[in-house]
Every structure is written in C-alpha cells, then in structure tokens.
Image (cartoon, rainbow, N blue to C red):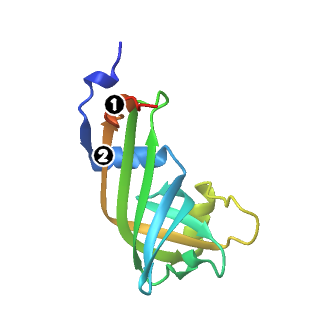
Amino acid sequence: MNTAATEPEIKELGVHDCWRYLRSTSVCRVAFTDGEAVKNYPVNFVPTNGTLLIRTGEGTKLSSLADRKVVAVEADGMNQYGTIAWSVILKGRAMVVSDAEETRDAMEAGLSPWQPGQKNILIRITPQDISGRRFVIAAPTHWWPPREPTAG
C-alpha cells in the first residue's frame, strides 16, 4: 500500500510537530546578519527546554551571536523511504550561555562538537516563532516536462 499517495501534498505543522521533527535531527543551518552581509552556517544542535543549543569556539562567526541577536534556524529531513519530507524554521534570539546551571544543562543534553578544538561557547536560541511543513516528494517524472528526442 502506498501511503504517500494518500497524504495531503503540503501540510502545515503545528508547534508540537515542529519540535518533534527538530528532536529527530541534530543538524541545522543558522542564519544571521553580520554588518551588511547575511551569514549562514551548518551547525549541530540539541533542543532542550524549549530552546536550541549550539556549541562553538572563540573567533568563529557564530561567536558573534551574543547580545540577543536575531537569527533564523532551518532544519530539514525526510522519512526512511524518501517519500515524505519536512522543513522547520525557527526564528528567535541568540544569546551566549554564561550561567553554570545552563552550561550543565547543555552538557547533560549531549551537545558535543563535531570538529576538534576548543568549542567552549554555548549559544542558546530562544524561539519567537516556529513553523514547518511536511509534504509528499513528487516523483522525478513530475519535476521536469518530458524531453523530446533530439535529432542527431
């Protein structure tokens, strides 16, 4: 039975579903402005206590996320069959974590860096808005119109 065919083409996700999908992955992209430029970086994260935690190092662009800077986070994924995809966008404020209890919370949540080196800066993103969509992935034959054979 093909369950993908019975799904609505695009479904807007509620807040609880958005968090469920965020908990199912550990990679997202965080976007923020840096002067006149928009920076966008892939990072690993962990959701905890209704926020997202990111770990980074001194001197990285992400360490500029202090002072409650506005950010957008996007995470995407698909089911194991490659038939249903989802995308969640979280908009909020980033703040460097300096409190010892919050640091302990981050460590207990299992947030560890993927790259070697000192990654001692924790950034907590507190959401102001979260939204998402889930949709059926169209068959490749629906992506492009059929090609006419070329004369040769």
Up the image or down, 96 lies above or below 115; here it is: below
Is residue 139 visible in the rendered structure shown here? Answer: no
Q: Where residue 81 sits in the image (x, y, percent)?
A: 47, 27
Figure quadrant of the N terminus: top left
**Which three-letter amino acid code belongs to the residue tagged 1?**
Pro
Query: Furthest residue to the bottom?
Result: 35
Mark 2 = which residue?
Answer: 133
Which mark is first along the chain, 1 or 2? 2
Is residue 129 visible in the rendered structure shown here? Answer: yes
Q: Residue at x 49, y 82 (%)?
A: 66
Q: Secondary structure at mark 1?
A: loop
| Residue depth check, mark 2 versus mark 1: number of the one nearer the observer | 1
Mark 1 = which residue?
Answer: 146
Query: Furthest residue to the top?
Result: 1
Residue 75's tag is: none
Q: Where residue 86 sits in the image (x, y, percent)?
A: 38, 43
Q: Residues within 10 Å of mark 2 (few under 14, many from 20)?
A: some
Position of residue 150 in the picture relative to residue 113 (left or right): left
Q: Residue at x 73, y 72 (%)?
A: 118
Q: Secondary structure at mark 2?
A: strand
Up the image or down, 134 lies above or below 70; here it is: above
Q: Where residue 47 sits in the image (x, y, percent)?
A: 48, 55
**Which three-letter amino acid code belongs to the residue tagged 2?**
Arg
Q: Where residue 11 sits in the image (x, y, percent)?
A: 25, 40
Measured in 3D between alpha carbons, the distance from the residue under mark 2 to the one under mark 1, in whole angstroms, is 28 Å
Q: Residues within 10 Å of mark 1 (few under 14, many from 20)?
A: few
Position of residue 60 in the picture relative to residue 10 (left or right): right
